[in-house]
Image (cartoon, rainbow, N blue to C red):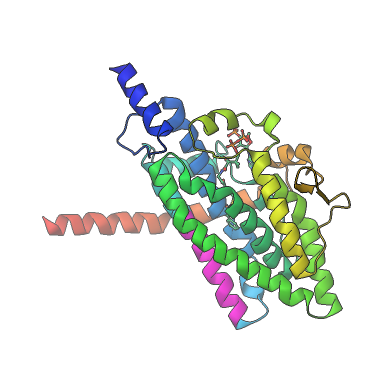
Amino acid sequence: AGEDLQGYFDAIVAADQKVEPRDWMPEAYRKTLIRQIAQHAHSEIIGMQPEGNWISRAPSLKRKAILLAKVQDEAGHGLYLYAAAETLGISRDELVEMLIDGRQKYSSIFNYPTLTWADVGAIGWLVDGAAIVNQVPLCRCSYGPYARAMIRVCKEESFHQRQGFEILHTLSHGTPGQKAMAQDAVDRWWYPSLAMFGPPDGDSTHSERSMAWKIKRFSNDELRQRFVDMCVQQAGVLDLRIPDPDLRWDEERQQHHYTQPDYDELMRVIKGDGPCNQERMEHRRRAHEEGAWVREAAMAYAAKRENSAV
Ligand code: FAQ
């Protein structure tokens, strides 16, 4: 029977069909998905902090309303993703616990500070842009609940990317001071955004297996390349410079040659030693503790309703 189950799973993956929560799946497949989906969910929640920093200081009421909506969308993405992870037999409480005690990670990118308003534009353009390039292929991931969550998430990320682009476009066509501020933000966010795609393929521990299982559809380097090619064209429209003196079109390979991000820095940031790691985790822990009464009240209310329904 064990062989039949494995054979059925292999056939579903080979036929590009979806594995669903009640289907048998290899334990390592389940574990990899929990790791990746949880890391993704935590990233959405921690990712609210850098931009949340600018809600009270947005330059106009309109910008503030847009930013509020964007940050709320990130919370929504986190919730869909926690729900997708729960279909694999783990609870949201356990996942949050693992984030808070450091056993699970979140994206390196959210450990960098947002120093000016232009950073909100650069995050939208570059960070959401990288997220889209990474997540569009995840809409075809072999695990049904993750793939379906990604469809809606990608639509919203696409709006986020455009709002960031529009902020930068406005600044870069404004006063010389505004243009310089936009350029400075792009200078600081470029390499950390390239690092979001993970270590180079040769050092990526999970890629081979995740690609065989069709969780990942492209390697880290393939997606990073796609992102660079996309940004070069858009930077032209923005009239902003990508901070890489070696960036050039490679006629032979039909893609851009570019300077790799500092992967030692990526590893340091992942291990907890980035500019804002401590601040982000302290903020998350505090919010979790201070929100305990809300969770308790919701549970008490649910129990009361259940009793009165009997
Ligand atoms: N940061 O073997 P690989 C967003 C870890 S977008 C931290 O290549 P894998 C939207 C990796 O976990 C950001 N850790 O790993 C938004 C592994 O560690 P482990 C979130 C990283 O999984 C925008 C080790 O290094 N998006 O939130 C990073 O095959 C604006 C070896 O790496 C996703 O999570 C990193 N950058 O490939 C929100 C997308 N890179 O667990 C708010 C889904 C690698 O063995 C505002 N995730 N690591 O100890 C993925 O596609 C993959 O997990 C990768 C990594 C591509 C990130």
Q: Residue at 62%, 77% (x, y): give it.
A: 63
Question: Depth check: 68 or 124 in front?
Answer: 124
Vertical position of residue 155 compared to residue 163: above or below = above
Rendered image quadrant of residue 185: bottom right
Rendered image quadrant of residue 132: bottom right
* Residue that sits furthest to the right in the current view: 245
Range of magenta residues: 62-77
Vertical position of residue 138 compared to residue 115: above or below = above
Vertical position of residue 190 compared to residue 3: above or below = below
Q: Residue at 42%, 33% (x, y): give it.
A: 13
How far across and down, in percent of the image, does residue 167 sit?
68, 73
Could you tell me if residue 148 is visible in this image? yes
Quadrant location of ligand 1? Answer: top right
Q: Dominant secondary structure of the magenta stretch?
A: helix
* Residue that sits furthest to the left in the current view: 310
Residue 64 in magenta stretch: yes
Q: Residue at 79%, 57% (x, y): give it.
A: 188
Q: How many marks?
A: 0
How far across and down, in percent of the image, does residue 153 sit?
49, 57
Vertical position of residue 256 compared to residue 184: above or below = above
Locate the N terminus by quadrant. Answer: top left
How far across and down, in percent of the image, does residue 33 sit?
47, 36
How far across and down, in percent of the image, does residue 310 sit?
10, 55
Residue 205 in magenta stretch: no
In the image: residue 171, left or right of residue 134? right
Q: Residue at 68%, 51% (x, y): give it.
A: 227
Question: Depth check: 39 or 240 in front?
Answer: 240
In the image: residue 254, left or right of residue 26? right
In the image: residue 105, left or right of residue 214? right
